[in-house]
Image (cartoon, helix red, strand yellow):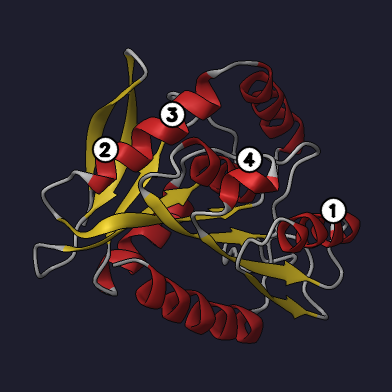
Amino acid sequence: MGENVTFKADGGTTNGYLAKPASGKGPGVVVIQEYWGLNDQIKGVADMLAREGFDALAPDFYHGKGAKIGEPDAAGKLMMELMRGASAAQDARGAARYLATHPATSSQKVGVIGFCLGGYLALLTAAEAPDVVSAVVDCYGVGHAPPPASKLKSAKVLGIFGGKDHSAQEFAALEKSLREAGVSFEKHVYPEGDHAFLNEQRKDVYRPADAKDAWSRILAFLKANVR
């Protein structure tokens, strides 16, 4: 139901996938990929959000590259290339500002949701474009060097974490830094959830009941905070 789009990002351009609501206009939400890249699964998330009434943009942070789900070495290489350069911050700013001014976006500011690597990139987007981001949903992603919490004060943050995730210590450190900086933060931890438990294409970790509950919380959070 979506379409491919191109938007400006600090003098260059970046591609993405835009899914608009049937009504023609809705609150804007940036949807950010796992470390596999912009694949059909992430486009499906954007489509689902469009069905819920959002104008959803999934930027292509890997610029046409990607790895198949189940090929962690290839995905890890792409992630390291991304983190070594400056394009992540540029694309994050460009995506948020493009969506905030898009004709199908009805909200004054936008929300951002990211998964795995995308959770870190969602936080980065809020730090890089505080003027247009009002809400962040971080689904089990932190990164070794998350943006300074002081740069996230303009956005409310929801953390969706798994109790069996290998990054549990990083989640705790993120929560501590956000709360100390006065950032509005809420979280929900699914005790039996592992990393990527929301990804229906990851049959090894997907937890349907937890995913259903998490999505109900995510949608309520976005609808309340992206206006």
Tell me which amino acid carries mark 1: Glu
Which residue is tagged 2?
98
Q: How many C-alpha atoms fall within 10 Å of the one at disc 1: few (<14), some, or many (≥20)?
A: some
Left-right relation of 36 to 196 = left
Nearest-to-viewer mark from 2 and 4: 2
Query: x, y percentage for residue 30?
Result: 39, 50
Q: Mark 4 vs mark 1: give the one in front.
A: 1
Residue 49 image position (x, y, % from top left): 34, 66
- Residue under the image location 54 percent in, 31 percent down: 66
Query: Which kind of residue does numbered mark 4 sit on?
Result: Tyr
The secondary element bearing badge 3 is classed as helix
Q: CA distance from mark 1 to mark 2?
A: 31 Å
What residue did someone put label 1 on? Answer: 170
* Total numbered badges shown on the rendered structure: 4
Could you say where residue 218 lies in the image, as x and y percent from the top left?
50, 74
Tell me the CA gap for discs 4 and 1: 17 Å
